[in-house]
Image (tube, rainbow, N blue to C red):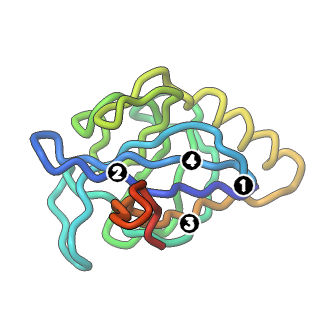
Amino acid sequence: MNLTIYRHTPNTKEDRNIIGDLHVNDEFFCYSLEDEIRPDGVKVYGKTAIPAGEYEINVTWSNRFKRNMPLLLNVPMFKGVRLHGGNTSAHSHGCPLVAFNTDGVKIWGTAEKELTKLLTEAENNGEKNYLTIRNSFLSYDKEAKKDTIVW
């Protein structure tokens, strides 16, 4: 199964998080929220988004959360990165948060349970799961007078 997070709305005040859209096999599934994106090689513990890129996902037991959860493998400079519920970057600690609702600043209505179920079913069918994270920031096109995605 292929998941993609398109990071699109960086918040520059207070929480300094970034909102994204999470797609499952090219279909919108939910929203994501991550910590602040920093320059390559710069990490502030508990307050930095993981690097954009592709990561394999395994559903494994989390001793911290006491349940099966999606775990991202081989994330540079990070350990124990999981997809889970939460509302603000205070809940992230470097992990992408997933939820069904957003106001562009926070997210709510966790999508973790449904996402874990989909990934587990794929694993049980012999599929490998992958997450690709892309920085796809919105910018305002003055001529077209609308928001556009900058790839």
Marks 2 and 1: CB-CB under 8 Å?
no
Contact? badges 4 and 2 (CB < 8 Å)? no
Residue count near mark 3 (Cα–Cα under 10 Å), binned few <14, some 14–19, many ≥20: some
Element at label 1: loop
Name the residue type under label 1: Asp
The amino acid type found where label 2 is placed reads Thr
Say which residue appears at 61% left-offset and 64% top-offset.
56
- Say which of 143 and 22 sits in front: 143
State the residue at coordinates (45%, 35%): 63
- The image position of residue 55, as x and y in percent, is 56, 66
Outermost residue toward the front? 143
| Residue picked out by circle 4 | 22
Tell us which disc is closer to us: 4 or 2.
Answer: 2
Eye-nearest disc, 3 or 2: 2
The N terminus lies in quadrant:
bottom right
Considering only order in the chain, which callout, 2 or 3, is on the residue closer to the N terminus? 2
Rendering coords of residue 21 (x, y %): 52, 47
Residue 59 vertical position relative to residue 85 in the rendered view, above or below: below
Q: Tell me if mark 4 has few (under 14), some (14-19) or many (20+) residues whose alpha carbon lies within 10 angstroms of its own.
A: many
State the residue at coordinates (32%, 50%). Answer: 18
Q: Mark 3 or mark 1, which is nearer the start of the sequence?
A: 1
First-in-chain label (4 vs 2): 2
Residue that numbered label 3 is attached to: 55
Return the residue at label 1: 26
Residue found at the far left of this picture: 14
* Residue situated furthest right in the rendering: 125
- Helix, strand or loop at label 2? It is strand
Between the C-alphas of marks 1 and 3, the distance is: 16 Å
User: What residue is at 25 percent from the left and 47 percent from the top?
Assistant: 17
Dot 2 or dot 1, earlier in sequence: 2
Q: Which residue is mark 2?
A: 9
